[in-house]
Amino acid sequence: MPSGPSTLRFRWASNWAATALEAAVMAAQIAVLWGVSAGGTALAFALHLPVPGNVIGLCALLLGLATGAVKMSWFDRGGDFLTKHLAFFFVPVTVGVMAFGTTFARSGIGIIAALVISAVVGRPSSFRRR
């Protein structure tokens, strides 16, 4: 393969295009996930349901994955990005939780018990193969 300034320029343009395409796919996947959450919120609001809308959207997505109507591969890049940067998304929540010191002082044992039980129950499911 010949090398020179024109070949280098072509390689750079090709890498840039591939990176831009991956970023666009990732953004589209995250937008669809956000849309599912927003749809659940709209449904909860319209039907006056006592369940948070994002939980309804999450259940709808789970139902779609379980029935095969939605493929896990449709969300690979976006889901990987969100999982990779999950700690960053918890910073605002952590700062907000600091305002609830009295609640934790009053109900801390129950909250810790709920966290431990959910971690124990959820852990085996994380070892399943895709």
Image (cartoon, helix red, strand yellow):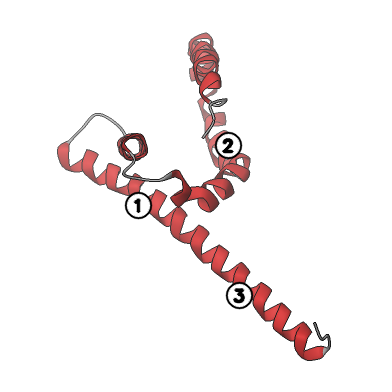
Dot 3 amino acid type: Ala
- Give the numbered dot on residue 35: 1
Marked residue nearer the N-terminal end (1 or 2): 1
Q: Is residue 92 left or right of residue 75?
A: right
Which residue, given by chain and number where applicable, does mark 2 sit on?
A: 95
- Give the numbered dot on residue 17: 3
The 10 Å Cα crowd at callout 3, few under 14, some 14 to 19, many 20 or more, is few
Asked which secondary structure carries label 3, the reply is helix
Q: Position of residue 34 (x, y in %)?
A: 40, 50
User: What residue lies at 51% left-to-right and 52% top-to-bottom?
Assistant: 78
User: What residue lies at 57% left-to-right and 38% top-to-bottom?
Assistant: 90
| Mark pair 3, 1: CA separation | 26 Å
Dot 2 amino acid type: Val
Q: Is residue 88 above or below residue 52?
A: below
Marked residue nearer the N-terminal end (3 or 1): 3
Q: Nearer the viewer, mark 3 or mark 2?
A: 3
Marked residue nearer the N-terminal end (3 or 2): 3
Quadrant (top left, top right, bottom left, bottom right) of the N terminus: bottom right
| Mark pair 1, 2: CA separation | 26 Å
| Mark pair 3, 2: CA separation | 39 Å
Q: Position of residue 105 (x, y in %)?
A: 54, 14
Q: Position of residue 118 (x, y in %)?
A: 49, 18
Asked which secondary structure carries label 2, the reply is helix
